[in-house]
Amino acid sequence: MTRLRLIQTVTAGVEPYLPHVPDGVSLCNARGVHDAGTAEWAVGAMIAMQREFPLFVRAQEQGRWAYRHTGVLADSTVLILGYGSIGAALERRLAGFEVEVIRVARSARDGVHAESELPDLLPRADVVVLLVPATAATKGLVDAAFLARMKDGALLVNAARGPVVDTGALLAELESGRLRAALDVTDPEPLPEDHPLWKAPHLLITPHVAGSTPASTRRALVYVEAQLRRLHDGRPLTNIISGGY
């Protein structure tokens, strides 16, 4: 493909493509396209787990009236790790839920904590939402030490990539009953049918569907058309991936 000038993904993550980009070719992601769907999934996962919807669904299937008090999202502290465009979209959707939001990114900026501050921030959070990209630096970021810093009963929500979380360490915390989790991504993925995560307590799993919505499709088409017009007209491209991603 000697005339190739641009590789345009329709995803925010570009890790599968990075090793294959030829010299002189621009790689661009679709930052912003999946913000609405992913943020909406994260809010839904939080509410489902805090209000114990999976338990009530199982009771419904059994025809059983399983009245009980549940947790609630209100008055919680939500830590967003990987605060970018999806994190901002998530915070906008959380605005009506009466929660405190702690923003964390790789580097500190106004209103956003640095990742290096996590050891002190994690014990404050009732919910930790993962939105970091999959890179060498984030692989296994959520390990046994990370999870141990989370408060008892806290909820881990992974809308990032599976390898960001040490599956064995998370499984141990779930089986002990100390932590809970909602995962849209897993390691490995797809999750084999005999994997112990399927039967782990205090866990909600969805099959990487957070951004799989009509809104994402519509926004991807609009964005790609605009990007192609920029390329055709010789104008600067948007969302160019460079450096450390």
Image (spheres, rainbow, N blue to C red):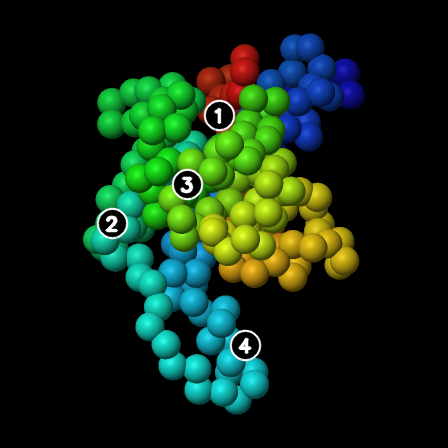
> Closer to the observer: label 3 or label 1?
3
Question: Which residue lies under the disc numbered 4?
Answer: 58
Question: Which residue lies under the disc numbered 3?
Answer: 150
- Please tell me which residue is depicted at 71% across the width and 15% down the height of the picture: 22
Total numbered badges shown on the rendered structure: 4
Q: Do the residues labelled 3 and 2 touch (CB within 8 Å)?
A: no
Mark 1, residues whose alpha carbon is within 10 Å: few (<14), some, or many (≥20)?
some
Q: What residue type is disc 3 on?
A: Met
- Please tell me which residue is depicted at 61% across the width and 48% down the height of the picture: 171
> Closer to the observer: label 1 or label 2?
2
> Closer to the observer: label 3 or label 2?
3
Q: What residue type is disc 1 on?
A: Asn
Badge 2 or badge 4: first in the primary sequence? 4
Q: What residue type is disc 2 on?
A: Val
Q: Where is residue 56 in the image (x, y as percent from the top left)?
A: 47, 76
Q: Where is residue 133 in the image (x, y as percent from the top left)?
A: 53, 31
Left/right placement of residue 140 relative to residue 95 reads: right
Question: Which residue lies under the disc numbered 1?
Answer: 239
- Please tell me which residue is depicted at 64% across the width and 42% down the height of the picture: 168
Left/right placement of residue 72 relative to residue 25 reads: left
The N terminus is located in which quarter? top right
Mark 3, residues whose alpha carbon is within 10 Å: few (<14), some, or many (≥20)?
many
SS class, disc 2: loop
Mark 2, residues whose alpha carbon is within 10 Å: few (<14), some, or many (≥20)?
some
Q: Is residue 139 visible?
A: yes
Q: Mark 1 to mark 2: distance in Å? A: 31 Å
> Closer to the observer: label 3 or label 4?
3
Q: Mark 2 to mark 4: distance in Å? A: 28 Å
